[in-house]
Image: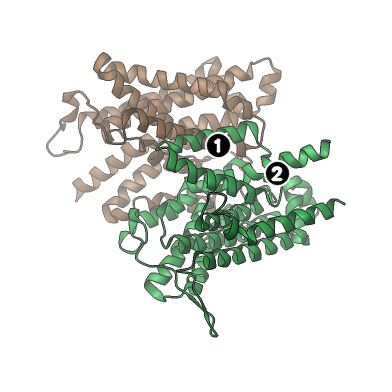
Chain colours: A green, B brown
């Protein structure tokens, strides 16, 4: 019965996302806002693979998001004007960096892990910020744009057509989410849950904990850098702030706000956060304070997140 | 060349003293309460701006004495109203809370005092160089280093010679036992948080005199402070002090040869320490896991 209800929820979510360009205008939004929601949802879901399902607190995911963004932008600007290759290079850069950093930190736990991820996150920010000639420094990487995707038998115009780019992003999201869901159902994913619930017991059962945490970190960062690459393509721009610690915090709050123990939570959280940020930044110059207050309210009153609360209410009634 | 080298080493020492002051406050809070105070940089800015506002009325010395205390008072209040509710929960939540707080403090200082850099006047005699040969050695810089060392010495005296210090140290090791022995842990954590914020406020006043004041002054100093803790070792205050000075001097020395790598070097140091000695130079065994 429960599985059936879950299937209906999945169906409703996919239907909603697939038809988004057709109803978001009526709801007061615009297509590229929808694209932003999907990109952020991808990043938050990927972070939650680590945060919610492995129980490891990473607070530096913006670094890999930003590497994806700069990787894509710089490839298109300096190397080959190809959207597909840009995405590929961005994802490769983010994942490679994550594999190295992950190897250094997989032994650390809890608050200490969080602190080290924050600190490492800033390395790439400084590089982007300082290496003016190549990255554009504080002004960001501009002077390039996404290009139509050439499929051989025809091309998809993702530049002029917002909807086409939305569907490209959604396709990326769908594949990523399907892979992560499959991983979580696999023995590997079950081991991650075991580590989250009781690391010592997992270790006694013979699960190589450090190796699993490392792999989970790399998988998570792989999809985060995909989100980053798509985000740069969405804006035709890579911003050093994509790499900064406040962006990492935004991803975490999205996951928590939606419900980090639920699979769809980060999507819900990303939707609320992105729409709210869009709305607040048109409303007042002090939106940063309001976002800060929002962080505090979420922590104080919705620590389980929207979906976590819904699920709990259903369980008690 | 020697002069340039000495200049940068001394500069690094000053910056390192700052990092250490910041990081010691962070470390105090982290060790006792398990909270990474992301808003530490925000409190630093508040300390600087409070001193800036108070100075016309009570002068430099008055502001130096009062502003950190006022900052600490705000810290006590924040702990009392917000942070204490999150003890014992997943560290994720306190991290997010102080994160939001950092946003509010930065935006709040910008709202009250404006986004532009405001000058911070220090007594005239401090701005002149002490000798022609060592032009960089102004009275203020020397004073700053001495004051930081005095503050650090006072902190270690407090921790080692007073009952409060004893309880903070004991609580950082095993809070449950300390509580069972009849110490009011709520008050202890509150005072400890205030103490940490006091150090941030003091760092803020000193930084204002050297760099001038702008709302983002805190967020620029907080990352190196994290690295100071990681390099020095979690759970060890002497380690934090060492870590701060070490990365400060290292970035100073590297500035001589590769100016653009002055920030990168501290991250490299962190990477090397994590690779060779994950618990940090003076870190206690078992703390990191």
Q: Residue at x 65, y 35 (%)?
A: A302
Secondary structure beneath disc 2?
A: helix
> Which residue is the extreme one toward the right?
A1
Instruction: Give the tally of numbered discs.
Output: 2
- Chain assignment, label 1: A
Residue holding disc 2: A307
Q: Position of residue B16 (x, y in %)?
A: 36, 39
State left or right for residue B152 relative to residue B172.
left
Q: Residue at x 69, y 25 (%)?
A: B176
**Closer to the observer: label 1 or label 2?**
2
Residue holding disc 1: A295
Q: Pointer 1: residues within 10 angstroms few (<14), some, or many (20+)? A: many
Q: Quadrant of the C terminus of chain A?
A: top right
Q: Nearer the viewer, residue A244 or B137?
A: A244
> Which residue is the extreme one toward the bottom?
A153
Sequence-first disc among 1 and 2 = 1
> Which residue is the extreme one toward the left?
B132
Q: Pointer 2: residues within 10 angstroms few (<14), some, or many (20+)? A: many
């Amino acid at each position: 019965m429960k599985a059936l209800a879950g299937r209906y929820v999945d169906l409703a979510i996919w239907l909603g996302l697939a038809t988004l360009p057709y109803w978001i205008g009526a709801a007061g939004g615009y297509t590229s806002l929808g694209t932003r929601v999907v990109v952020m949802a991808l990043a938050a879901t990927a972070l939650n693979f680590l945060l919610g399902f492995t129980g490891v607190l990473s607070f530096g995911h913006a670094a890999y998001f930003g590497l994806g963004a700069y990787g894509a932008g710089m490839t298109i600007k300096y190397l080959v004007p190809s959207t597909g290759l840009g995405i590929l290079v961005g994802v490769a850069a983010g994942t490679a960096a994550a594999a190295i950093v992950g190897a250094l930190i997989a032994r650390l736990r809890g608050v200490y892990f969080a602190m080290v991820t924050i600190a490492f996150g800033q390395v790439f920010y400084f590089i982007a910020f300082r290496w003016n000639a190549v990255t554009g420094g504080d002004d960001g990487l501009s002077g390039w744009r996404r290009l139509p995707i050439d499929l051989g038998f025809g091309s998809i115009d993702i530049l002029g057509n917002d909807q086409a780019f939305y569907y490209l992003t959604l396709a990326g999201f769908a594949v990523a989410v399907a892979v992560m869901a499959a991983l979580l159902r696999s023995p590997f994913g079950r081991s991650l849950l075991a580590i989250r619930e009781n690391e010592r017991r997992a270790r006694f059962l013979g699960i190589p904990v450090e190796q699993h945490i490392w792999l989970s970190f790399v998988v998570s960062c792989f999809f985060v850098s995909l989100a980053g690459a798509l985000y740069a393509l969405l804006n035709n721009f890579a911003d050093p702030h994509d790499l900064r610690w406040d962006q990492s915090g935004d991803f975490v709050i999205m996951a928590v706000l939606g419900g980090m123990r639920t699979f769809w939570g980060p999507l819900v959280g990303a939707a609320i956060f992105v729409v709210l940020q869009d709305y607040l930044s048109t409303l007042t110059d002090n939106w940063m304070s309001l976002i800060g207050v929002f962080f505090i309210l979420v922590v104080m009153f919705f620590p389980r997140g929207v979906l976590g609360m819904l699920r709990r209410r259903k369980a008690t009634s | 060349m020697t002069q340039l080298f000495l200049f940068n080493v001394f500069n690094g020492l000053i910056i390192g003293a700052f990092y250490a002051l910041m990081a010691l406050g962070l470390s105090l809070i982290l060790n006792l309460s398990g909270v990474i105070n992301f808003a530490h940089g925000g409190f630093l800015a508040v300390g600087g701006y409070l001193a800036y506002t108070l100075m016309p009325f009570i002068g430099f010395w008055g502001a130096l004495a009062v502003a950190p205390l006022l900052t600490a008072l705000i810290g006590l209040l924040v702990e009392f109203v917000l942070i204490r509710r999150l003890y014992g929960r997943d560290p994720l939540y306190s991290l997010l809370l102080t994160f939001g707080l950092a946003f509010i403090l930065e935006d709040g200082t910008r709202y009250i005092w404006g986004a532009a850099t405001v000058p911070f006047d220090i007594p005239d005699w401090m701005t002149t160089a002490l000798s022609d040969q060592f032009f960089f050695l102004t009275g203020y810089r020397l004073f700053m280093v001495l004051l930081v060392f005095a503050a650090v010495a006072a902190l270690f005296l407090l921790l080692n010679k007073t009952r409060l210090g004893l309880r903070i140290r004991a609580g950082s090791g095993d809070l449950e036992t300390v509580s069972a022995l009849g110490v009011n842990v709520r008050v202890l954590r509150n005072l400890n948080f205030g103490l940490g914020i006091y150090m941030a406020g003091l760092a803020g006043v000193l930084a204002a005199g050297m760099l001038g004041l702008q709302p983002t002054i805190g967020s620029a100093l907080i990352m190196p402070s994290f690295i100071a803790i990681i390099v020095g070792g979690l759970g060890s205050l002497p380690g934090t002090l060492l870590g701060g000075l070490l990365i400060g001097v290292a970035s100073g020395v590297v500035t001589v040869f590769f100016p653009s790598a002055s920030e990168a070097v501290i991250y490299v140091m962190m990477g090397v320490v994590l690779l060779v000695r994950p618990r940090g130079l003076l870190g206690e065994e078992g703390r990191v896991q």
